[in-house]
Image (cartoon, rainbow, N blue to C red):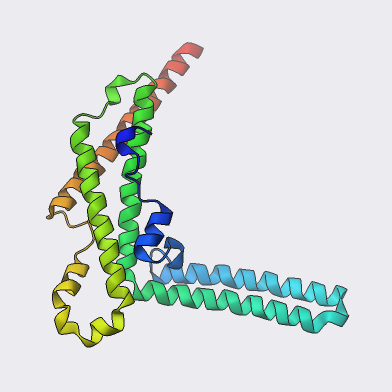
Amino acid sequence: MRADIQGLEITVGELKHLSGAGPDRVYRPASATKFAREALKTVGLIVLVLISCWLLVVIFPRAYVLWLALHLAAIAGLIFEDVWKIQCSRQNQHLINLFDDVDRYNGIIKAIEINDKIEDAGNVEVKIGDRAKVIQALQLIRDDLVRALKTERILRENKKFVATNSELFANNLRTLNALQISDRSSQQGRLLNEALQLAIGVQAKMKKLQDRNAANLKNGKS
C-alpha cells in the first residue's frame, strides 16, 4: 500500500471505538427478510444443540440434569442474541447506514490499492490521474464519516435525555437524518460520487486487462 493511502482506511477497531458498537452488533440490512434468514439459522443451531443434548443423555444418562441445563442455557443464549440484535438493528438504522457508508469508503481505498499494484506490475495505462485531488477528497470523506459516527454515538447514548428535551436537539436530530454521505448535493457527497466513479473506472480497467491477457494466452496457444 502506497504511503498516501496508508491510514485512510477506517478499521474495525477504529469503527468500534468511534461508534461504541461493532458492525456485528446489528443485522445488515435491517430488513424482515434478513431477520427471517438469521432466525432460520438460529433454529438450525437449536436443532443441533438438541441433538447434542439427546446424544449426551443417552451416553451419560446419570448426568442428564447437567446436560439439560447446559444445553438449555445455550439455546437461551442463541435466542437472546437474535432478539437483542434484531432490536438493536430496528432501533439504530442511522448507525447501520453509517456502517454501510464506511464499507463503501473502505472499498474505494481497496480499489485504489489494487489499481496501484496493477500499475506497479507494469501497466502504466491504469495510473490514476490527479491522484493528489483524489486522496484529498478521500480524506475529507473520512473526516466527515468520523464526525458522523461520533455524533450518532453521542445522541444514541443519550437517547432518553434527547427524547425528553427534543426542542433542545431539534437541529441535531435533523442533522443526524442527513449524516449519510449519500447526499449528492453536499460537497462530501459529490466527492464520494467522484471517488465511486473512480472505483468503477478501476474495475473497468482491470476487466480490460484481464480480457487482454486472456486473448494473449489464447493466441499463444493457437
- In this view, the residue in front, 83 or 16, is 16
Q: Quadrant of residue 180?
A: bottom left
Q: Indicate left or right for 27 with 58 as reference.
A: left
Residue 97, horizontal then vertical, whole percent? 31, 63
Residue 208, horizontal then vertical, whole percent? 34, 27
Q: Residue at (42%, 61%) from the top-left corner?
A: 23
* Residue 222 seen in this snapshot: no
Quadrant in which the N terminus is drawn: top left
Q: Residue furthest bottom?
A: 164
Q: Quadrant of residue 29?
A: bottom left
Q: Is residue 15 above or below residue 3?
A: below
- In this view, the residue in front, 72 or 1, is 1
Q: Residue at (34%, 43%) from the top-left corner?
A: 7
* Residue 9 seen in this snapshot: yes
Residue 26, horizontal then vertical, whole percent? 42, 67
Q: Residue at (45%, 71%) from the top-left corner?
A: 35
Residue 145, horizontal then vertical, whole percent? 26, 56
Q: Indicate left or right for 46 with 124 as reference.
A: right
- In this view, the residue in front, 207 or 11, is 11
Q: Is residue 149 above or below residue 60?
A: above
Q: How many marks?
A: 0
Q: Residue at (85%, 76%) from the top-left corner?
A: 58
Q: Is residue 189 above or below residue 196?
A: below
